[in-house]
Image (spheres, grey):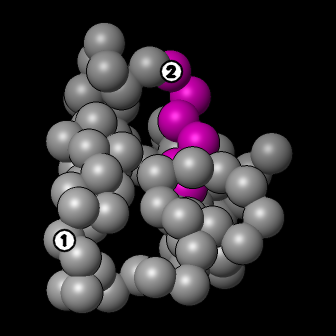
């Protein structure tokens, strides 16, 4: 999970001119940042199988600031 999210944000930051997301920071949740969010009912770092049942375990799905699912 961390490899696909915050660690990739760090790699983009190190890519110099090839960095495709320069208008805002990556890997953080704050105004102006690029962010895709999943709110998971449980800890996917301890139990990755939670992501295998998105209807049951994903409370919020947001991509590019647009909400696709919200059961909060």
Can residue 21 be found in the magenta stretch?
Answer: no
Q: Is residue 10 above or below residue 25?
A: above
Query: Along the horizontal axis of the image, is 56 left or right of 71?
Result: left
Residue 34: % across, % down? 55, 71
Please name the residue shown 36% across and 26% down the image. Answer: 44
Please name the residue shown 26% across and 44% down the image. Answer: 7
| Residue in front for this viewpoint, 18 or 67 | 18
Residue 37: % across, % down? 55, 55
Please name the residue shown 66% across and 79% down the image. Answer: 66
Quadrant housing residue 31: bottom right
**Furthest-front residue in view?**
16
Asked whether the viewer can see residue 19, the reply is: yes
The chief SS type of the magenta part is strand
Please name the residue shown 19% across and 71% down the image. Answer: 15
Quick one: SS at disc 1?
loop
Crowding at mark 2 (Cα within 10 Å: few <14, some 14-19, many 20+): few
> Which numbered disc, 2 or 1, marks the residue that appears first in the sequence?
1
Asked whether the viewer can see residue 55, the reply is: no
In magenta, the rendered stretch is 37-42
């Amino acid at each position: 999970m961390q490899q696909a999210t915050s660690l990739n944000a760090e790699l983009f930051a190190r890519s110099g001119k090839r960095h495709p997301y320069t208008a805002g920071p990556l890997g953080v949740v704050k105004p102006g940042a690029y962010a895709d969010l999943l709110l998971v009912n449980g800890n996917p770092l301890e139990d990755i199988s939670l992501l295998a049942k998105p209807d049951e375990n994903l409370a919020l799905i947001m991509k590019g600031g647009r909400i696709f699912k919200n059961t909060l």
